[in-house]
Amino acid sequence: MSPADRFDFDIAVAGGGPAGAATAIELARRGRRVVLLERDRFPRFHIGESLVATAGPCFDRLGVTDAVRAAGFPAKWGASLSTHDGGGVRAVEFASSDEVAQPQTWQVERARLDRILLDRARDAGAEVREGCRVAACELAGDGVTLRLASESAGPSTVRVRAVVDATGRSGLLANQLRLRRDEPGLANVSIYAHFSGVEPLPSPKSGDIRIVARADAGWFWLIPIDERLTSVGVVLPRALYLSLERGDPGRMLAALVADTPVVAAWLAGARREWPVRVEKDFSYSVSAYAGDRWLLVGDAGSFLDPVFSTGVAIALESGLEAATALDAALAKGEPRLAGFRAFERTQRQRYARFRRFVVAFYTPWFRDLFFQPAAPSALFRAVVTVLAGIWKPRLRTRLLLEVFFAAAALQRYFRLAPRLVLRGPGLGYPSRSRAAARRPA
Ligand SMILES: Cc1cc2nc3c(=O)[nH]c(=O)nc-3n(C[C@H](O)[C@H](O)[C@H](O)COP(=O)(O)OP(=O)(O)OC[C@H]3O[C@@H](n4cnc5c(N)ncnc54)[C@H](O)[C@@H]3O)c2cc1C
């Protein structure tokens, strides 16, 4: 029996979100026999609606740019940053960085974006099975057997040469192999829903994301996902969440909106159109992203707080990277860990680069500079480059970023910039300067 006969497909991709679809599209385009197994039936709701500029080149490679454009999603050119009282307003414009190839990206309804990507995987030649959950994965030296639970066909198995886990936060393999590493310092909670009637930003910024620093360590997002609906969510560090009066999530979200003046003003005539959802502890990484015959992509590997909207772009990039690594490994022989070292390194480096920003965002000294309307423009442009999704910028940008982080570190002890007036737990200014931090600048 030839090796091709021993396997039902070359590769199985578990999960059909952006990471899984990108992996399957790229592998199928390279002529590999791919099966994509998705638990749900699309379209289905998913959070993760604001894209960064690096999504565009991925869409080009995947052949979906025309379909994404035709979907009529709101055009996003950047972000509008402000503090809870409407102060500290600062525009993040992706076009201000000359490293950003495609400064215009989109705010998306994920149900529709994910459907576009899954349809493209089918068109590219992958076999896509919806309503088909991967219940377990048996990894062996000579191949991988996946146990499936399908709505329509009942239990079955698929045998492949390698598996790509793209099951998102469910983390099929990360849980099975005990790879997941929590991020206790980023154990945040998010409460969100969709609203109609939210006051838009004036054109041409109407498609931008609004990020509002609350008067405590929390923050709000407002993302217009179509002409009618805006996704509105708040993220709170766990200690802060626990210190608040809890109960019905709808009431909690309403109270947090009411307590954030600029958001309350934008939502004055708004109506909630969806149930309120809550997500907790969403940041984590893994001890390994690949092994013999397996790779992890997107959220199935790691995920960082949503503050910089990098989740979908990273899912697409890692899917493309996994497909490239697997294709090369299969061309040489068996898909073993030795062929995935560069893939592993890339996942780790990207996670570490973005993590540095996310961890810093929850410190008051970083926020003092980040929400500072008068921050020096060369430094802020360097920050914008990373906010656009470019995690490996040029040397000059990297040096400017070091200066920015050094300034934030100094702000902790000296007042380089006016301090935001913050309250509540989780703020962490050194005690000798805490009183000063609370005084309005
Ligand atoms: C509160 C919050 C806000 C966010 N906001 C943003 C944002 O604004 N912008 C952004 O880019 N990102 C955002 N994200 C992150 C974003 O949601 C994810 O990073 C992104 O969806 C990851 O894509 P993925 O393909 O890896 O996983 P997913 O999109 O989660 O896809 C995984 C798929 O696997 C399927 N699946 C699960 N288990 C199985 C199984 N056993 N068998 C078969 N299929 C299975 C699921 O049904 C799902 O379709 C946010 C996340 C959170 C928590």
Image (cartoon, helix red, strand yellow):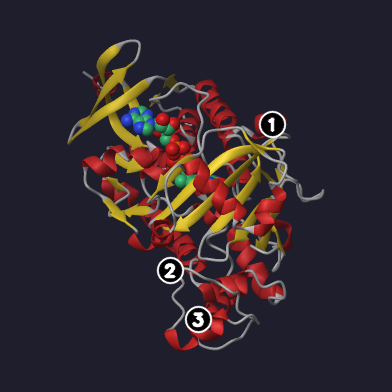
Q: Farthest residue toward the top?
A: 153
Position of 352 relative to 318 (above/below): below
Residue type at tag 3 = Ala
In this view, which residue lies farthest toward the right? 203
Return the residue at label 3: 409
Judged from the image, the quadrant occupied by ligand 1 is: top left
Label disc, if present, on residue 66 of the rendered structure: 1
Q: Earlier in the sequence, mark 1 or mark 2?
A: 1
Residue nearest the observer in this picture, 257 or 394: 257
Which is more foreground, mark 1 or mark 2?
2
Image: 257 above or below 296: below
Which numbered disc flags the more N-terminal residue, 3 or 1?
1
The one nearer the camera, 60 or 210, is: 210
The residue under the point 69% across, 63% down is 97
Mark 1 and mark 2: Cα distance apart in space: 45 Å
Residue 217 appears in the rendering: yes
